Amino acid sequence: MNLIYINYSFEIPADGTYYIVEDNTNLPTGGASPGRSAEVNIKFSRTRCLECEEAALEEQRIYEEAARLYEEEQKRLQEEMNKSKEPKPTPGFEMIFSVLVMFFSVVMFGKK
């Protein structure tokens, strides 16, 4: 049995699709005999990437802060729109109304 045990370790540089090719030839020297089956056992281990996790948490924090600021701005704009819909006081009209009330009061009560 042409048993050969080889361990490889590498870090995948980016997300994507990767292929493992097992070449069942007698090259390089000492390789398996051609035409015979070969059994390959592969083990994948995933380790934590603390830098990746920290970057993801920072991106999430930035996104949440942007969302909070957006909501505050939308609330402020809505309040401004609601204020602009309210009728504005007209001090001149109130003064004219007060003078008319006093005039009619004097006229009505002064003719007794």
Image (tube, helix red, strand yellow):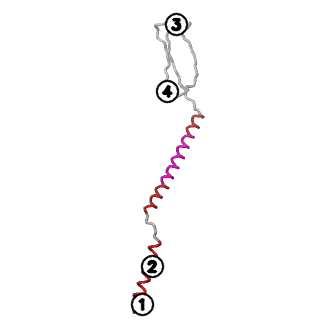
The residues colored magenta run 58-75
Residue sitting at 58 percent across and 32 percent down? 49
Q: Secondary structure at mark 3?
A: loop
* Above/below status of 34 relative to 48: above
Looking at the image, do the residues carrying marks 1 and 2 touch, with CB atoms under 8 Å apart?
no
Please identify, in this view, whether the residue under mark 2 or under mark 3 is nearer the observer: 2
Q: Nearer the viewer, residue 57 or 62?
A: 62
Q: Looking at numbered disc 3 in the image, what kind of residue is underneath it? A: Asn
- Between disc 4 and disc 1, whose residue precedes? 4
Around disc 4, counting alpha carbons within 10 Å, would you say few (fewer than 14), some (14 to 19), or many (20 or more)?
few
Looking at the image, do the residues carrying marks 2 and 4 touch, with CB atoms under 8 Å apart?
no
How far is mark 1 from mark 2, CA to CA?
Answer: 17 Å
Around disc 3, counting alpha carbons within 10 Å, would you say few (fewer than 14), some (14 to 19), or many (20 or more)?
few
- Between disc 4 and disc 3, whose residue precedes? 4
- Between disc 3 and disc 1, whose residue precedes? 3
How far is mark 2 from mark 3, CA to CA?
Answer: 111 Å
Q: Which mark is residue 98?
A: 2
Q: Is residue 51 magenta?
A: no
Q: Which mark is residue 110?
A: 1
Q: Looking at numbered disc 4 in the image, what kind of residue is underneath it? A: Gly
Q: Position of residue 54 (x, y in %)?
A: 59, 37
How far is mark 3 from mark 1, CA to CA?
Answer: 128 Å
Residue sitting at 50 percent across and 52 percent down? 73
Please identify, in this view, whether the residue under mark 4 or under mark 3 is nearer the observer: 4
- Between disc 1 and disc 2, whose residue precedes? 2
- Between disc 2 and disc 3, whose residue precedes? 3
Q: Which mark is residue 16?
A: 4
Is 32 positioned to the left or the right of 106 in the image? Answer: right
